[in-house]
Image: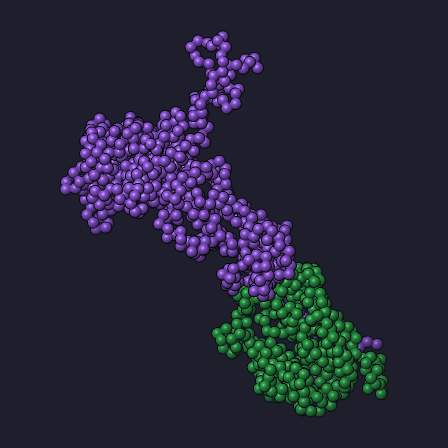
Amino acid sequence: MTSSALTRPGQRDRVPVKFGEIDWTLSALICLIAAAGGLMLYSIAGGSWKPWAGSQMLLFGLCFLLMMALALINLRVWFALAYPVYGIALVLLVLVMVVGHSALGAARWLQIGHLKFQPSEVMKMGLVMALARFYHGLPADRARLSWWLLIPLAMIGAPVLLIAKQPDLGTAILLASTGLAMMMLAGLSWRLILGAVAAAAIAAPGLIWAILHGHLVKGYQAQRLLTFLHPEDDPSGAGYHILQAKIALGSGGFLGKGYGLGSQSQLDFLPEKQTDFIFATLAEEFGFVGCASVLLLYAAVIVICLRVASISHSHFGRLAAAGVTATFALYILINGAMVMGLAPVVGVPMPLLSKAGTVMTTVMIGFGLIQAVRVHRYEEVTSGSGAFM
Amino acid sequence: MSEPSIFFNEVNERQGVFHRRAFVMGALTSVGLLALGGRLAQLQLVEANRYKMLAASNQFNFRLVPPPRGRILDRNGVEIATNRPNFRLLLLKDEVQDPNVTLDLVSEVVPITPDKRRQIMRQLAETQRFVPVAVVDDLSWDEFARVNVRAAELPGLQPDMGEARVYPFGGAFAHVVGYVSRVSDSDIEKAGDNPDPLLLNPGFRIGKSGVEKALDLELRGKSGGQKVEVDAKGRVIREDPAGNIAPTPGKDVVLTLDSDIQNLALEKFGENSGAAVMMDCRTGDILCMLSAPSFDANAFVRGVVPSEYRALSEYDHKPLLDKSLAGLYHPGSTFKTMVSLAALESGVDPKRTYTCNGSFAFGNHVFHCDKHHGTLDMHGAIVTSCDVFFFQTALVVGPDKIAEVARRFGLGQTFDIGVSGQRVGIVPDIAWKQAYMSARHADPRWYAGETPSMGIGQGYTEVNPLQLCVMASRLANAKKALNPRLIHSIGGVEQPPGSAVEDLPFNPDHIQFVREAMASVANDARGTAFAAAQLGLGPIKMAGKTGTAQTHNYVAGSHGEHGAEGQWILRDNAWFIAFAPYDDPRYAVAVLVEHGGMGGLAAAPIAREIMRVALLKDPQVRARIEQPLPMPAMDPAAMSGDVAPPPPTDLPGAPRTGPTGQQLQNPLADPTT
């Protein structure tokens, strides 16, 4: 038993009590990472708050307050909102396919009045919450292996396909991976998992061949794969990002070139340096030491979040927290692989570091959910039997 | 108390499952992060140097620094081709906001014609980014300073100090030295697969003709590099002088030419068209190689205006042609020296006479001589240049022997003088005609009636002035088959001289006979060059041979039209070859005056003047020429025997060495000092 105030009767719903239960270590780590991002944006802009560092820090401040606020919202509310959020996100995705604001030939944004947002971001939260709710009501043996599993597959498949058609391959991969991770966390049969992995491994070469020969995905995405495999073939065109990122990264050495002295970024050799490739800038200026430190911070965040998930008494809470953590971890792994030349460039930013307003907001909302799971860890969410309840 | 830790409490099955699965997820994530960490280590620790180098090559560039071009000097070190600073204005396309406004501002200081403005705008549109476009060249220091003051308010305008080629003697050396001009596409093609980046640099000038072209690579040098730091767009951020690579200057080339002689030669030609070549007949050095009229090579460095070029190329005196190497003409009577030598070598008796009545009938053709010479032997025939004598002598000797001798004296040959453009001409013989005519499906047989014209240097025979000068110098030398040499040294390394050659394979007495006859041409009252060939240098005498070569067929009996009065293009070419001093030959010259008329009247005076200058520049010859001073009063006791006392040496202007080089002493000087 604990001595937390949450266990004393009548205390659980008092705001000051809840506020005290927010994980301050986690919050501190998040602030540290965001601060590192701000530092890099300041340096990349040539030593100035404009045009990136200032607005990013401001947004982070607002999102931090948002996280605090969301932490106080009862898990039951989250539970109740799960399917509605998912449903709205799905509708918005369909809408964006029909009327979406097309930038760079990709329909990803919706504009309502002054507000411009990406429905795929809403879906990231929506899918996690909906899957958590679904599995909350599903007994363990059904979660392991049964025909019921077609439902989560559909819940994952529909938005993934819609997003892939936008086309936003990076987000589609992210979402699909999150969904599958949640299915594994919920107890999917190991045999099924290993079987699927084996099947994918066998199909992969054929898949790659098909992509390279123009099937399955759009031309430029196939080109991305080709460029990834042979960046040297086109050093000034498509392979440029990859090569420049490797040069920036590698030339950082052990200690880096020093704050503000990253020649590749300062001299504009590294493109997307404030968004997708910000980690390369960090690597150039702070070297291996800097990179390893940031990766350790991220690892610490993930470990803490998994602990939070584990101590929750409700299945919904556990799965929701773990799902958000999975999304967070996938951002890091995919972007890291991209920047280091281990994966094709797919347009996934580094959470909290990159200048990416929408992603930051979503990530902080996710942390809000995790904090809420911690604050409400003793809460009994309506755990009816069967799905949809 | 602490929070519950992640132990596998099976409070309920789903929680247990979740704990295990969460652990797996954590483990997988850790593996992923470790993989990233490992990759980081590989790039940042293991391969760091490779990427540091790549980063540096992204970052640093070398701006080409053109090397200073080597100079071209004459044998005395006088500069014939050199460099001067060229103050100019460059426009940087991507930094200038409005080119028209900038050009307006510039034209307040330095005028820009509308033509030039159009050209600049076109160049701006065509050149790549970051390659500057030259706006104005050749600013004076004053203009340059004024523009520099205003340069701050004109973004994109860059004052620059480059180098421009300048030829102090614009005309006299235009053919032999040549000129430099802008690099053309065919120049780049000829440079092969890896052209020197200097060729692609705007404003770089490459040798286009003459020595400038032949020795272009040696004169060019190697470019250096100025180390600059650039950003991803190629913009220069700052310079790094510590990393600069100094350019290697081009090598200086010393020619054997003498600028005094060459300039005087051009002056003496005046408006006439022709060529003059002078060689040193002991070493084979070419002292003068001139083609007249000439043009200003400096105009070609700037870029000659089309109307200027048209005027030059359409002028019938052909100023652009290097007549000394590429002009082919019938040698006329100068060839009689070869015919005589061939006759002597064939055993013909020089005392044998022929009678000239002004014409010679052979077959059904009548050959004419320009005078009635009466009865002459070989010496007299050379001195008076009698055609009839040589018509008949040539028939006796035959074309093959004449051709053999002529070739030994340099006719029909090209020489390795280091520049291109020599035309080989024709020395005909029976085999030559056979080959030449068969290839053209014409009659290949040599007809006897063609021999007489060969005997007087007409017919198929064609030579260029350099070949005739070589012939004259070989006659002058009398022993060695001298080769001409134009390039004295490149970068201080001397080139092999022209005297290291084999002997002439002829009887020295025969050669001497011809030389004596040549001396009489100039110094005997009957000689065709007597009037014009007097040097006026005391004991120094010149020997020579005139030539008057027909260029067009005479209408019967109307010789007068091809003399000095007729239409220019129909007149005869005038030749004069000579060498001096006769008793100790030093210089040999060949002068051609195109359509000048009679050799003795047109070419000989020019040759005389050129020869005078050459001789007067020679200190040993001067010593012979200068008059000894009157003798001072003598002390009878100082007279010893029957040897005349030597001249005094302590008076101003008195020679110090005698003709044989011995030191002279002053008999009045105190013998004890």
- Residue B352 found in image quarter: top left
Quadrant of the drawing holding the C terminus of chain B: top right
- Residue A141 found in image quarter: bottom right
Quadrant of the drawing holding the N terminus of chain B: bottom right
Q: Position of residue B523 (x, y in %)?
A: 32, 28
**Horizontal arrangement in the rendering, residue B422 relative to residue A8 (left or right):** left
**Horizontal arrangement in the rendering, residue B666 relative to residue A323 (left or right):** left
Chain A: colour as depicted: green
Residue at 84% over, 82% down? A16
**Horizontal arrangement in the rendering, residue A84 relative to residue B671 (left or right):** right
- Specify how the rendered protein is coloured: by chain
Identify which residue, A55 or A210, lies in the foreground. Answer: A55
Residue at 35% over, 49% down? B316
Chain B: colour as depicted: purple
Q: Position of residue A260 (x, y in %)?
A: 70, 62
Q: Position of residue A172 (x, y in %)?
A: 60, 79
**Horizontal arrangement in the rendering, residue B428 relative to residue A302 (left or right):** left
> From the viewer's perspective, is residue B498 above or below residue A201?
above
> From the viewer's perspective, is residue B623 above or below residue B443?
above
Residue that lies at the very extreme toward the top in this rendered image: B637
> From the viewer's perspective, is residue A266 above or below residue B406?
below
Identify which residue, B410 or A61, lies in the foreground. Answer: B410
Identify which residue, B254 or B319, lies in the foreground. Answer: B319
Residue that lies at the very extreme toward the left in this rendered image: B364
Q: Position of residue A133 (x, y in %)?
A: 69, 87
